Amino acid sequence: MPPQASAGPDQTVIATSTVHLSAEDTVDDNGGWTLRWQQTAGPDVELSDPTSLTPSFVAPLVTVDTVLTFLFTITDDEGAIGTDSVDITVQPIPDTVTISGNINHGAIVHGSLGTGLNYSSQGFATMHAEVLVEAIDATTQQVLASGRFAGEYELVVPSQREVAIRVTAAMVRRAPRPLPHWRVVVRDLDDAGNPLGPAYSFSSPAFNSGPGGTHDVNIPSGWSNSGQLIGPRDAAPFAILEAVVQGIDLVLEVDPSADFPDLTIDWGPDNVGGQTFYTSDPGGSNRRIVLSGERDVDTDEYDPHVILHEFGHYLDDSFARLDSIGGPHGFGDLLDLRVAFSEGLATALGAIALGDPYYRDSFGPTQGDEGYFDLEFDEQLAEGWYSEASTWEIVWDLKDHTSDQGDDVTIGFAPIWQVLTGPQRETDALASIFSFATALKTGLEEVRPDVAAAIAALLSNEQVEGPTIDIFGSTETNDAASADVLPIYTPVQLGQTRQVRSTNEFGIFNKLSNDRFLLLSLAAPANVRFRVSADTGRDADILIFRRGIFVGPANLGPANEDFTLDLEAGDYVLDVYDCGNADCNDDVPPAPTDITVTVSAN
Amino acid sequence: MSGMHAVALSALIATLAAGCGSAALSPPAQGANAETAIEQMSLARPASGKIGAPVDVRYEFEGSPAPNRPAALNLAVVARVPGRNLRVEFPATSGIDIQGETAPLSVQKADPAGVLRRRVVVTPLSATATEVRVMVSMDAGSGRYFGIHVIPLAAPPASKRQPR
C-alpha cells in the first residue's frame, strides 16, 4: 500500500506574511521515509526546508488574489510514492491593516520592609490607566491613528508603512462621554519650573505595519536590575498614573458619577529630592501635584503611597474641604488641627486606595532605603486631635476589617466619603477631626447606635474626646499638657474683648497654638469692626473665615490690625496668630504672644 | 533643578583620607564660636510636604560663602522626639563643594536633650549655587522617617507663610 501523504488544508494569507505548510498528518510508519515539497504553480517562493514536514515561506507581494500550489511527495523504503497538493491563495495587502498589542510599563516594587526598591525583581506590567495611544509615521511623525486604551490597544493604519506607537501619560475622560470625568496629565519641567510639553510621551521603536499584527509596547524603566541608571526613565510617568488610577477607582466605587477636576502632575528626573507636595490656587484652580525624581536622593515614581497621599490632598480639596495651611510636619509633631487632619486623612486615603496600611517612601543611593510606617499600628506618642498619626489611625480603622486595640468598627469607605463630601464640606467649624468625626457619629447614631459608640471608643483611644464630641471640640480636655491650647475656639460676641495666646511651644509655622481661634456668631448682618493688638515688637494678624471661605481682611499690617467688614448672619472663625510664631515676619522672632481681639458693631 | 553634576562626595572623602587636604582652597580661619547655642542658630527648612523625620537642623555660617570662596558651616542636629538610628548626611547638591566632616553621621539613640554638631566647609562653585542640603533619617515609634533640609547660602528666604 503506498504511503498516505497529506499536504495540509488550503490556506488564504496576506502578502508578505510568513506561511507555514504542514504535512504532519502524513502517516510515516518508520519515520525515515523521504519527504519533498515542490512548488507547482504561482510566483516562485523559497521554501525554508523542502525536505521537512513543516517548511515555511514568505508570501510574495501581489496585486490580485494569486494561487500558489505545492506538491508534497513521500517515498517509502520500497520506493512506493504518496502525494498530495495544497493551494495557498495570496491576497494583496489591504490599504489599511490592524495593529494591536499591550501597553506595558516598567514596574518596580518595594522589597522587604526597610530595603527600598527592589530592582532585581522588576518587570513589565500592563497599563490599567486609559491613556492616549497613537500610531505615527516614523519619518514624518504624522498621526495615522489614535485612541484611548487601557491595557490593550488596537489601531487601523496604512499597510506597509514605517510606524511607531506613541503613548502619552494622560488620562482623559470628558464630554461627550457620560460621567465620570477626569483629566490627569503627567508632565516634565525644565530647570526654571516651566513645563517642557503638555505631557510625557513615549514612542516605540519603528516597525513596518506590513500586513498588521501584534506589536506590544514595552515602556522601559531605565534602571538595571542592580539599580543603576541605564536609560531614560520613560516608565515613571506611567507608573505614576497607575497609582493615581487606584485613587480614582476608590472614589468611583462609592461615587460612580464623580466629576474630577483637572489635575496636573509634575515629575521629572530633575525634580530635586524632597520637593513633593500638592498645591492649588485660591479658589481651587490649577490643581497640581509635584513629585520628587532625584535619583539616589529621593524618587517618588515607584512609591504609590506617596503619590496617593498627595492625591488624597487633591481629593480633599476637590470634593471635601481643605482648610489646611500646609507646611512641614514630622512624626510626633503637635500640629495645627487643620494640618493634623489634612495630613492624616491624605495618608489614610492613600492606604485605603491601595488596600495596604504600610506607607513606604524610598530614598537614598539606588533608592535602597525607605521611610515607612504602619497605619494599623497604634502609635502612643503625642496622640490627640493635633496628631496626624491619630487621624490616619482613626480613618484607617474606620475602613479596615481588623479589630484591634480601640478599634471595633468597620464602616467601609462609603460613609467616610459621604461625610467628606457632605457635612465636612459645609461645616461652620474648621475642617478637622472634630468636624469629621462629629458628622460621622451623628449620622449613624439613630440608625446604628452601636457603631456610633464604637466610633466614640476609637476616638477616645486616640485621646480625642469621643462620646460628647462636637464640631468645635468644645468638650475636648486633651490640652497637650499646656495652658495655651484650650479652648480650641474661644467664643466672642459683638461688643466683647478676648485675649488668646499664640505660642511657639510646639514649634513654628503650622504647629499647635501658633494660631488660636475664636468663634463669632452673628444673629443678623452687621458691619463689624475688628481690633487686634499685641505688645510692641510683635505682629498680630487675623484671618476671618465663613465655612472655610476667606472673607477678610484684604490687607494685613506689620503690627496691629484695625478694620471693618460687612458680614452676613452666621458663624465666623477668627484665625489669630503672631507672625513670629507663624513664620510670616522675619523681623519678629518666635515667642509666646498675648493677642487682644475686640469685636464690635461699627 | 539644575542638571549640573556635583563633585562626588566619595572623591572628597578619599581626598581627605589620603591626607592631601584641600589643594587650592584652605578653610577660613575659625571665627565664631562653634558651640553657639542652638537657639541662636538659624533653622533649616524641610524641603518637602511629605511627613519627615522629627529632627531640627540648625546652622550658622562663619563668614559668607560666595563663588569659589569657602565658608565654614556649623550644624546642630536635634531630635524633637526620642528616636533611634539617627543619620545625617549631605546629598550631592549641584554646584556645591563640601569638605570636612562630610562622612554620614549616625547615632543609635537620639533624644531632644542631645545635640549633634558637625562642621564642614562649603564652597559654592558658581553664582547659581544657592543652597546646601542635609538629609536626616531616624527611626521613631514603629516607623522610619527621613527629610531633606535646605540651608540657603545667602540670607534666609523670605518667610514662607504669607498673609493672604
Image (tube, rainbow, N blue to C red):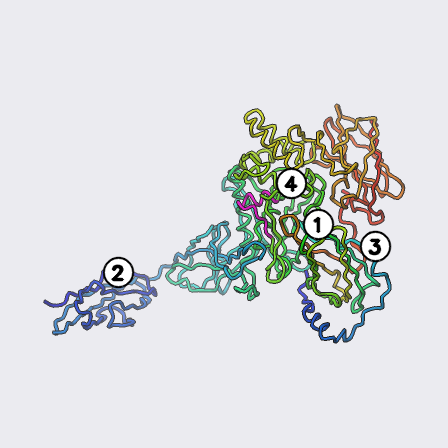
Is the residue at mark 3 from the same chain as the one at mark 2? Answer: no
Tell which tag, 4 or 1, sits nearer the viewer. Answer: 1
Residue A338 or residue A36, whichever sits in front: A338
Q: What element carries label 2?
A: strand
Instruction: Please name the residue that numbered disc 3 is placed on.
Output: B37
**Residue A315 image offset from top left, x and y in percent:** 60, 42
Residue A390 tag number: 4
Please state the extent of the stretch shown in magenta in the rendering: A347-360
Amino acid type for the residue under numbered disc 3 = Ala
Labels 4, 3: one chain: no
Q: In this view, does B28 lie above or below A495?
A: below
Q: Which amino acid does label 4 sit on?
A: Ser
Give the SS element for disc 4. helix
Judged from the image, the secondary structure of the residue bearing numbered disc 1 is loop
Q: Is residue A574 left or right of residue A131?
A: right
CA gap, disc 2 and disc 1: 77 Å
Q: Name the residue under label 2.
A: A11
Amino acid type assigned to the residue bearing label 2 in the image? Gln
Residues under labels 4 and 3: Cα distance? 34 Å
Determine whether label 4 and label 2 are within 8 Å by CB. no
According to the picture, the residue beneath numbered tag 1 turns out to be: B82
